[in-house]
Amino acid sequence: MGVFVLTATLAVYVCLASHLGAWQAIPLTLAVAALLALGAARHDAAQPAALHIGPGELSVWDRAGGLLAQGRVVGCAQWSDRLLVLGLENEGRPMRRLHSRSRTLLFAADALPAAVFRELAVLGRRAAGA
């Protein structure tokens, strides 16, 4: 993410400097860099850090301990042991960052331990009736 912020900031500076001049482009470039860094930090903080797999239910937590998604697994799609999509249905419990009653979660096999990925796939297939 840092390389993206640096590259985008440099691109903004090059574009602005050619139109405004080198010194006038610096404040706008710094503002863009700050916005991109803030967005990158928020994106990193919103990434899931922990899963709790229960009987027919799944909850996803962020690094700060906030609940991102929780609910009963209602659907599943899996592509060749590499990608798993689970549909969750919330039963009315309030969540900090989730306002809808349903949520779709995407899991890449290389992002999880193999045993956890298999357990999620079995949970999803059972919920989908496959």
Image (cartoon, helix red, strand yellow):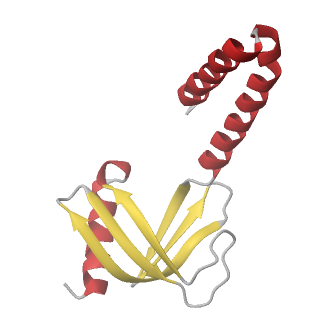
- State the image coordinates of residue 102 (x, y, percent, origin top left): 50, 81
Q: Residue at 58% x, 28% y: name it.
A: 2
- State the image coordinates of residue 86 (x, y, percent, origin top left): 37, 72
- State the image coordinates of residue 79 (x, y, percent, origin top left): 21, 62
The foreground one among 53 and 14 is 14
The foreground one among 23 and 122 is 23
Query: Of all residues shown, which one is farthest toward the front?
Result: 19
Can you say which quadrant of the picture contains the N terminus?
top right
Residue 44 sits above or below residue 83 on the image = above
- State the image coordinates of residue 74 (x, y, percent, origin top left): 37, 85
Q: Give the image quarter of residue 20.
A: top right
Position of residue 79 in the picture relative to residue 108 (left or right): left
Residue 31 sits above or below residue 81 on the image = above
The foreground one among 128 and 35 is 35
How many dots with numbers?
A: 0
Q: Residue at 40% x, 77% y: name it.
A: 87
Can you say which quadrant of the picture contains the C terminus?
bottom left
Residue 10 sits above or below residue 126 on the image = above
Position of residue 53 in the picture relative to residue 96 (left or right): left
Position of residue 72 in the picture relative to residue 24 (left or right): left
Residue 3 sits above or below residue 26 on the image = below
Q: Residue at 43% x, 67% y: name it.
A: 105
Q: Give the image quarter of residue 40.
A: top right
